[in-house]
Image: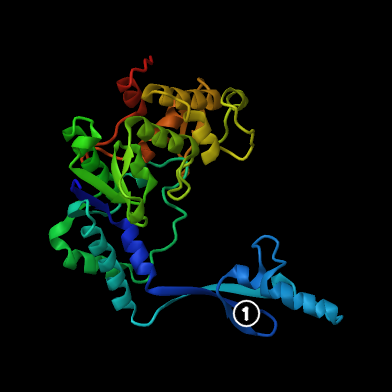
Amino acid sequence: MKKYKAVVDVDTLLIHAALAGQETCVLVEHSATGWQREFKTQTEFWGHYLKKEGGWLGDVNKDKESKGLPTASPDEFVLTPVVRLVPDAEMVVKGRFKNKVETIKVQPWCSDIEICFGVGENFRYEMAETIPYKNSRPPKPLMYETVKDYMLYKYANKMCIVEGVETDDIVAQKLHEAWERSGHNHDNLDTIGLLIDKDLKQFPSIQVNFDKLEEGLVKITELEAAKNLAVQMLMGDNIDSIPGLPLLDDSLFEKYKLRKTKKGVGETSAKGVVNSATSVQEVYERVVEAYRLHYGETKTQFISHNGVMSDRDWLDQLNERYRLLRMRTDVTKDVGHVIDFLKGLGFEYE
């Protein structure tokens, strides 16, 4: 079997390892009496988070009703998330991280590894105008710093650390460089990506999901890569708080035979727009069409999340999404304006 150097997007590995060192539950307290009890989740306590009619509380209320007793309202309780370390947490998290890395190293296709790690706040925080970047991400696990320090010590000679960019950008550059060296031929690649993040599927490459090693090597073609980025540009990225297109124009539901929805552009609709495209240019023509139809050619007033006013049309809206979603193929350079990206594909704009 051919062997490759594996560049590792380590962010998720760090989080997964650190999470192994903690356990979570919900402390439920009855406001009037001070009664307390821990439950694994809020769902276990009161069922669906909107209805709040099931779970343990639902069973208790059914029993009370059968006895003619007054039931308890969900509003009588205060729920507090609890996070605590497991026994021997440091040993657990270090072992989890090491086992994962060593498992990657012994794969039959792996000749060597390079662990990529971006540090410091990156440019996307300043670039995001519609919604603050990553404003809904949960706090890092309690043992995150412990795992990170262990990684930096244990695998110091395998690290590629870059300041001011995300880990994804470092991996993107390395995958792009490998693609260029290969002459755009998967058979000539000498480097593959070890990752779980969908952001890096916007590049033609060979990738392996480190949580599903049994799936083996997965080839991403240039057309597939274009579709993956296009889908993100249409639906946005909830994890990173990057907005997508608010709605598809009614004409597109009919044109691409999609089920009509008023809930915004989800993954199914976004894929439905681009999946039948047969060329990279056609993929982005469809994205441009969707943005043009929704936002229009006339500039209208736009107010950023921090109160800055400007005028925007469809191209300005698309440009923000592109610059936030597009991974860098050179970590020292801005990806540039989306219009330059489109012109490089043969589009012509005034």
Which residue is outermost to the left? 157
* Quadrant assignment, res 231: top left
> Which amino acid type is marked by label 1?
Glu
Is 240 on the left-hand or right-hand side of 4? right
> Can you give x and y, in whole percent of width and height, for residue 140 in the image?
38, 64
- Residue in the picture at 84% in, 78% down: 66
Which residue is outermost to the right? 68
Mark 1 surroundings within 10 Å by alpha-carbon count, few (fewer than 14), some (14 through 19), many (20 or more): some
In the rendered view of the protein, which quadrant contains the C terminus? Answer: top left
> Can you give x and y, in whole percent of width and height, for residue 302 in the image?
50, 33
Q: Is residue 106 above or below residue 317?
A: below
Residue holding disc 1? 29
> Can you give x and y, in whole percent of width and height, for residue 156 in the image?
15, 62
Q: Secondary structure at mark 1?
A: strand
Between 72 and 189, which is closer to the camera in this rendering?
189
What colour scheme governs how the chains and residues are painted in the rendered image of this protein? rainbow
> Can you give x and y, in whole percent of width and height, for residue 48 in the image?
66, 63
Q: Is residue 228 above or below residue 50?
A: above
Is 157 on the left-hand or right-hand side of 95? left
Q: Is residue 331 visible?
A: no
- Residue in the picture at 36% in, 35% down: 225
- Residue in the picture at 23% in, 30% down: 184
Q: Is residue 8 above or below residue 298?
A: below
- Residue in the picture at 60% in, 82% down: 37
